[in-house]
Image (spheres, grey):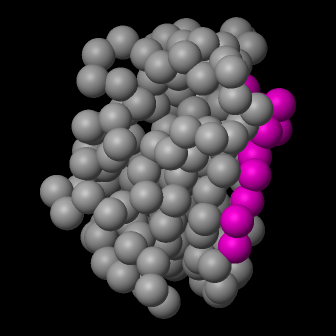
Amino acid sequence: MLVIDDFKEPTGSSRFGTAWRLVTDGVMGGSSSGGMMLREVDGYPALCIHGDVSLENNGGFVQAVLDLAREGHLDASSYQGIRVLVRGNGETYNLHLKTADVRFPWQSYRASFLAEPRWRELRMPFAAFRPHRVDAPLDTERLSRLGFLAIGRRFTADLCVAEVAFY
Protein backbone atom coordinates (compact mmCIF):
# COMPACT_ATOMS: atom_id res chain seq x y z
CA MET A 1 0.00 0.00 0.00
CA LEU A 2 1.16 3.54 -0.80
CA VAL A 3 -0.48 6.27 1.29
CA ILE A 4 -1.32 9.37 -0.73
CA ASP A 5 -2.58 11.34 2.28
CA ASP A 6 -3.57 10.63 5.87
CA PHE A 7 -4.13 14.33 6.69
CA LYS A 8 -1.66 14.32 9.57
CA GLU A 9 0.62 16.96 8.02
CA PRO A 10 -0.22 20.31 9.67
CA THR A 11 0.64 22.23 6.49
CA GLY A 12 -2.07 20.35 4.60
CA SER A 13 0.38 18.83 2.12
CA SER A 14 -0.12 15.28 0.88
CA ARG A 15 2.60 12.64 1.19
CA PHE A 16 3.64 13.70 -2.34
CA GLY A 17 4.16 17.32 -1.25
CA THR A 18 1.16 18.57 -3.21
CA ALA A 19 -1.80 20.47 -1.75
CA TRP A 20 -5.54 19.86 -1.92
CA ARG A 21 -7.57 22.54 -3.68
CA LEU A 22 -11.29 23.30 -3.62
CA VAL A 23 -12.91 23.79 -7.04
CA THR A 24 -16.59 24.48 -7.66
CA ASP A 25 -18.63 24.89 -10.81
CA GLY A 26 -18.15 28.64 -10.36
CA VAL A 27 -15.09 28.27 -12.60
CA MET A 28 -17.55 27.76 -15.47
CA GLY A 29 -20.39 30.01 -14.36
CA GLY A 30 -22.27 27.62 -12.08
CA SER A 31 -23.66 28.57 -8.70
CA SER A 32 -22.66 25.68 -6.41
CA SER A 33 -20.91 26.78 -3.23
CA GLY A 34 -18.67 24.93 -0.84
CA GLY A 35 -15.71 24.81 1.44
CA MET A 36 -12.92 22.50 2.45
CA MET A 37 -11.12 22.20 5.78
CA LEU A 38 -8.81 19.95 7.76
CA ARG A 39 -10.31 18.91 11.09
CA GLU A 40 -10.50 16.00 13.49
CA VAL A 41 -13.64 13.84 13.18
CA ASP A 42 -14.19 11.08 15.75
CA GLY A 43 -10.46 10.86 16.42
CA TYR A 44 -9.37 10.91 12.76
CA PRO A 45 -7.58 13.84 11.13
CA ALA A 46 -9.60 14.40 7.96
CA LEU A 47 -10.17 16.57 4.94
CA CYS A 48 -13.83 17.63 4.95
CA ILE A 49 -15.75 18.99 1.99
CA HIS A 50 -19.09 20.68 2.46
CA GLY A 51 -21.40 22.72 0.30
CA ASP A 52 -24.53 22.98 -1.75
CA VAL A 53 -24.54 21.53 -5.24
CA SER A 54 -26.72 23.51 -7.64
CA LEU A 55 -27.62 22.68 -11.22
CA GLU A 56 -28.31 26.31 -12.13
CA ASN A 57 -26.25 27.96 -14.89
CA ASN A 58 -25.12 24.51 -16.14
CA GLY A 59 -23.39 23.87 -12.82
CA GLY A 60 -23.37 20.86 -10.60
CA PHE A 61 -20.21 20.16 -8.59
CA VAL A 62 -18.07 20.87 -5.55
CA GLN A 63 -14.74 19.07 -5.42
CA ALA A 64 -11.43 18.69 -3.60
CA VAL A 65 -8.60 17.89 -6.03
CA LEU A 66 -5.01 16.80 -5.56
CA ASP A 67 -2.19 16.70 -8.09
CA LEU A 68 -0.42 13.35 -7.69
CA ALA A 69 2.96 14.72 -8.75
CA ARG A 70 4.54 18.15 -8.66
CA GLU A 71 5.40 17.74 -12.31
CA GLY A 72 4.27 15.17 -14.84
CA HIS A 73 2.52 12.05 -13.66
CA LEU A 74 2.63 9.16 -11.18
CA ASP A 75 3.03 5.49 -12.07
CA ALA A 76 0.50 3.48 -10.04
CA SER A 77 0.53 0.43 -12.32
CA SER A 78 1.88 -1.84 -9.56
CA TYR A 79 -1.29 -1.22 -7.50
CA GLN A 80 -4.83 -2.59 -7.91
CA GLY A 81 -6.83 0.50 -7.03
CA ILE A 82 -7.54 3.20 -4.50
CA ARG A 83 -8.40 2.67 -0.84
CA VAL A 84 -10.22 5.42 1.04
CA LEU A 85 -11.46 5.88 4.59
CA VAL A 86 -14.57 8.06 4.33
CA ARG A 87 -17.52 9.33 6.32
CA GLY A 88 -20.41 11.38 5.02
CA ASN A 89 -24.07 12.22 5.17
CA GLY A 90 -25.47 9.14 3.42
CA GLU A 91 -25.07 10.64 -0.06
CA THR A 92 -23.33 9.24 -3.13
CA TYR A 93 -20.06 10.91 -4.14
CA ASN A 94 -17.53 10.40 -6.91
CA LEU A 95 -13.82 9.79 -7.01
CA HIS A 96 -12.33 11.03 -10.27
CA LEU A 97 -8.92 10.24 -11.73
CA LYS A 98 -7.13 12.15 -14.44
CA THR A 99 -4.22 11.01 -16.57
CA ALA A 100 -1.87 12.50 -19.12
CA ASP A 101 -4.53 11.54 -21.74
CA VAL A 102 -7.11 13.89 -20.19
CA ARG A 103 -6.88 17.33 -21.76
CA PHE A 104 -10.18 19.01 -20.87
CA PRO A 105 -11.69 19.77 -17.43
CA TRP A 106 -14.86 17.73 -18.12
CA GLN A 107 -12.90 14.55 -18.91
CA SER A 108 -12.07 12.00 -16.21
CA TYR A 109 -12.28 8.40 -15.07
CA ARG A 110 -15.06 8.07 -12.49
CA ALA A 111 -16.17 5.76 -9.71
CA SER A 112 -19.06 6.41 -7.31
CA PHE A 113 -19.35 5.50 -3.64
CA LEU A 114 -21.80 5.88 -0.79
CA ALA A 115 -20.48 7.87 2.18
CA GLU A 116 -22.36 6.58 5.22
CA PRO A 117 -22.56 8.57 8.48
CA ARG A 118 -19.82 6.39 10.01
CA TRP A 119 -16.19 5.80 9.07
CA ARG A 120 -15.91 3.13 6.41
CA GLU A 121 -13.01 1.74 4.37
CA LEU A 122 -13.69 1.41 0.66
CA ARG A 123 -11.54 -0.19 -2.00
CA MET A 124 -12.13 0.91 -5.56
CA PRO A 125 -10.24 -1.17 -8.11
CA PHE A 126 -8.94 0.71 -11.13
CA ALA A 127 -11.28 -1.46 -13.26
CA ALA A 128 -14.25 0.25 -11.54
CA PHE A 129 -13.30 3.68 -12.93
CA ARG A 130 -15.29 4.47 -16.07
CA PRO A 131 -14.12 6.92 -18.73
CA HIS A 132 -16.21 10.09 -18.96
CA ARG A 133 -15.93 11.98 -22.26
CA VAL A 134 -12.54 10.45 -22.98
CA ASP A 135 -11.81 7.64 -25.45
CA ALA A 136 -8.52 6.35 -24.03
CA PRO A 137 -8.61 3.58 -21.41
CA LEU A 138 -7.38 4.41 -17.91
CA ASP A 139 -3.59 4.40 -17.98
CA THR A 140 -2.44 3.85 -14.38
CA GLU A 141 1.17 4.47 -15.42
CA ARG A 142 0.31 8.12 -16.08
CA LEU A 143 -1.97 9.34 -13.28
CA SER A 144 -1.90 13.09 -12.76
CA ARG A 145 -4.75 14.02 -10.41
CA LEU A 146 -7.53 12.69 -8.21
CA GLY A 147 -10.61 14.40 -6.88
CA PHE A 148 -13.48 13.79 -4.49
CA LEU A 149 -16.68 15.26 -5.89
CA ALA A 150 -20.23 16.06 -4.94
CA ILE A 151 -21.64 16.14 -8.47
CA GLY A 152 -24.55 15.88 -10.83
CA ARG A 153 -27.63 16.59 -8.74
CA ARG A 154 -28.93 19.16 -6.28
CA PHE A 155 -27.93 18.20 -2.72
CA THR A 156 -25.97 19.24 0.36
CA ALA A 157 -22.47 17.78 0.44
CA ASP A 158 -20.81 16.73 3.68
CA LEU A 159 -17.91 14.35 3.08
CA CYS A 160 -14.83 13.68 5.21
CA VAL A 161 -11.82 11.65 4.07
CA ALA A 162 -9.32 10.35 6.64
CA GLU A 163 -7.03 8.40 4.31
CA VAL A 164 -6.38 7.95 0.60
CA ALA A 165 -3.96 5.26 -0.61
CA PHE A 166 -3.12 2.99 -3.51
CA TYR A 167 -3.54 -0.69 -2.62
Residue 47 in percent (x, y) is at 39, 66
Quadrant of residue 66 within the rendered picture: top left
Instruction: Give yes or no for residue 126 being in the magenta stretch.
Output: yes
Q: Which residues are magenta?
A: 120-131
Up/down of 47 relative to 137, above or below: below
Quadrant of residue 109 within the rendered picture: top right
Task: Pick whichever, 68 or 57, lies toward us.
Answer: 68
Residue 60 in percent (x, y) is at 51, 56
Up/down of 46 relative to 59, above or below: below
Q: Main secondary structure of the magenta part?
A: strand
Task: Pick whichever, 113 or 135, lies toward us.
Answer: 113
Task: Kindly give the residue lying farthest to the front in the view shown.
Answer: 1
Kindly identify the residue that appears in the image at 26 percent across and 37 percent down: 17
Tell me: 97 left or right of 91. Answer: left
Kindly identify the residue that appears in the image at 60 percent across and 23 percent down: 76
Tell me: 69 left or right of 153. Answer: left
Tell me: 70 left or right of 73. Answer: left
